Image (spheres, rainbow, N blue to C red):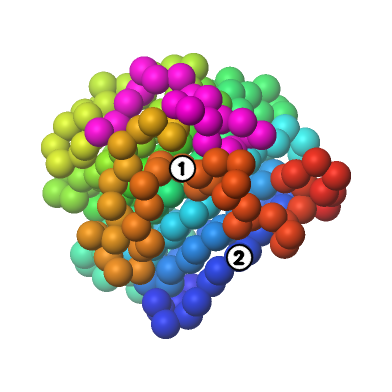
Amino acid sequence: GGVGSGTQIDNVQVENSGDDGIEIFGGTVNMKHVILTGALDDSLDCDEGWTGKVQFAIIVQKVTQTGGPDRLIECSNRLVSSVNVPANPQNSNPTIANFTFVGIPQNFAGTTFEGGINLNATGGTPGASARFINGVVRGSTNCAVLTLANAGLPPRFDSNLFDCPTQPDATSLGYINGGSSTNNTTVTANSLTSVFVNGPTETGRTAFNASTVDAFFSATTYIGAVQNASDTWWQNWTCGLSAGSVC
């Protein structure tokens, strides 16, 4: 809660969490090389004005636990139960780059609308915002559900590939394809291999240089979290992601 950017979080996997995979309450903490697999609720949840950064993130949902999962990402501004909230609370507004999110269209309980990326105004406005760079989202019923993003601070998307059964609604598409967002596609089929490793479609997409946004980010020439089969940053310290590796 409220941890600052001086804290380094790197090479973390959360497997089969009984709630959210990682939930961040405020602050500016940054993370690299984060893997969230099988979370019962949201895989990554942010509240209370978190404005940190994430690069190289893999999310893989599973239908293995009663009642879940829920969203790939849910970002809200503040919780209804918060105390001593200022009159103008800060927006949650993270920047997330080089990510691969693999959702599912239906959870264990049979809910058939699984929203992938969800930015909302839970507890009141202003709502959450975010910037998404060089991402691949597939599998959820709807890749992006931007329900109540604050009009004064619109989300931005740069070089993302969305491949889900249902197109984002008109409001969400307006943010993905409009404003200062650039080079996104909602009509291109993904070619991921081994669940989350880039294939030829992802390799062929033009990447955005995230290092121009902030020095925290490494410059990459590819979208997604894993460039190809030779990109093995996730191996030897994770479980359940490669053949023969179990948790």
Give residue 11's mark: 2
For residue 11, side relative to residue 50 (left or right): right
| Residue 89 is one of the magenta-drawn residues | no
Q: Compared to 132, does 164 lie above or below?
A: above
Type of amino acid under label 2: Asn
Residue 69, located in which quarter of the rendered image?
Answer: top right
| Residue span colored magenta | 183-201
Q: Amino acid at mark 1?
A: Gly
Q: Secondary structure at mark 1?
A: loop
* Whether residue 126 is situated above or below residue 147 in the rendered picture: below
Q: Tag 2, which secondary structure? A: strand
Q: Is residue 57 above or below residue 86?
A: above
- Which quarter of the figure has residue 65? top right
* Nearest to the observer: residue 162 or residue 51: 162
Q: Which residue is mark 1?
A: 224
**Identity of the residue drawn at 50% across and 44% down:** 227
10 Å crowding of disc 1: few (<14), some (14-19), many (20+): many
- Give the overall secondary structure of the magenta segment: loop
Q: Residue furthest bottom?
A: 6
